[in-house]
Amino acid sequence: MPDINFLNLFQGIATLFATDTLITVARIGLIVLGIALVYLGARNILEPLLMIPMGFGMASVNAAVLFLSGGKLGTIFIDPLVADPSQLMNILQVDFLQPIYTLTFSNGLIACFIFLGIGVMTEIGYVLASPFSSMVIAICAELGTVATFPIAVAMGLNYSEAASIAMVGGADGPMVLYTSLMLAKDLFVPITIVAYLYLSLTYGGYPYLIKLLIPKRLRGIQMDLSKIPTVTPGEKIAFSIITCTVLSLLFPVAAPLFMSFFLGVTIREANLKHYISFIEGPLLYGSTFFLGVLLGVLCEANTIMNPKILVLLVLGILSLFLSGLGGIAGGYLMYWINKGKFNPVIGIAGVSCIPTTAKVAQKAVTEANSQSLILPYAIGANISGVITSAILTGIYVTLIPVLK
Amino acid sequence: MSNKRKIYWITGTITAFTGVLMVRILALQTAGRLKLPVMFGGYMLAIAGLFIITLGTRRK
């Protein structure tokens, strides 16, 4: 009988014994985590649109490690570290997700597609209707994005890494992805995974923060909806093009994000139905799907096991927590400016996880007073938060290379 | 569009682009200690200009 090494027939298992114990434990842990994410996504406990493809990718890539040529261990999903053009051309024909990763993910295109989709779904009129409160709240809600930077530097990260993890406080996945790709390419996988995992948790965590910091009496304040002015589509389009031009002139490195968002808004206001249904449907859902799959597949133990991962986990949650605190502080500031006629819960919507935080704010208010409707103001703050996060992305991406 | 709202639009646009000019051209030409205040002032002016425009978009 020929001498058959049965372990080599099942290389996914054989490779478990051919590497460090730590990597083996990490692979098994990530397989379990991947399965857990699929379960939690299917149960709607975490965002299913991202967690289901991400969980599948995570579990599959860690199970499917094999022996490549030269005795190296790897997978035929993606090689995110290949940079040499001739090697890249080779790997594009071998690894099945490599073309999607190289041509849409690592250059930030997928982040821009998602931002285009967000723009098409965004009603910018709410920002224009209450610009002062939206802007104040949005600026306050960037507390995490700003305050986490020096804390991250003090904890041993360099400026680029600190800025990338601080952007988690902006609570906008595409912007975290974009910033970390521009500034900290070595850490963009763990930073983006941390960001998307935590963003799924904001729906669960922020209501407790609201209840802790805002008494029921204030949570139930009714907003005067009759004072919301109307804005014509022409004005929204003019505002979009002027704002996009101004922000792109100020922060050209973040111009792809600005252009994508405001182009989406303009397409919506111009009522280009075919573009709207294409962007809202195949483009946005396709991008979200592949983003989830790629994030999951990038969680291969050898790629993600980085000594800084624990620091990133702590800083990510700190950044989101500080942003929530800042947003609520902004809400209180507006309550004081308006002499008690402003619901401070709206402040949490300044954290730009659109439209999650606006929905969280409305839900918290409804629980305190079922007659109170704050959603128009919350969405205004939400959208303003997206714009201020984009501005902060531009500031970090512009300034950090100069500071180095 | 009423005259008042036109004034907000024009003033806001001019203010915003003046801010851009300060950041992208004037600050680069300025040396020494003035560079940072000119740049910061430009950014603030640009954002103030956008805010002024929003005041001109509102009608009851």
Image (cartoon, helix red, strand yellow):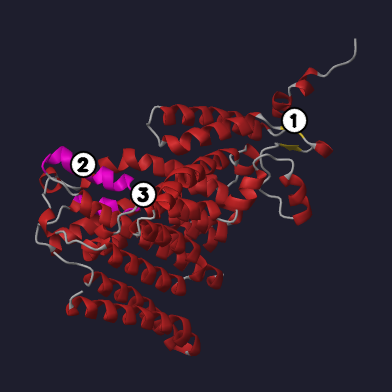
Q: Position of residue A368 (x, y in %)?
A: 14, 40
Q: Is residue A355 magenta?
A: yes
Chief secondary structure of the magenta portion:
helix
**Badge 1 vs badge 2, beta-carbon distance below 8 Å:** no
Q: Is A340 drawn above or below residue A60 in the view shown? A: below
SS state under label 2: helix
Extent of the magenta region: A345-371
Which residue lies under the disc numbered 2? A364
Residue type at numbered disc 3: Cys
* CA distance for labels 3 and 1: 42 Å
Q: Is residue B28 magenta?
A: no
Q: Position of residue A178 (x, y in %)?
A: 51, 56
The subunit carrying tag 3 is A
- In the image: residue B19, left or right of residue A176: left
Which residue is pictured at 70% across the width and 37% down the height?
A76
SS state under label 3: loop
Q: Is A306 drawn above or below residue B14 in the view shown? A: above
In this view, the residue in front, A304 or B47, is B47
Sequence order check: which comes first, mark 1 or mark 2? 1
Q: Of the numbered discs in the image, which one, if any, rests on residue A353? A: 3
* CA distance for labels 1 and 2: 52 Å
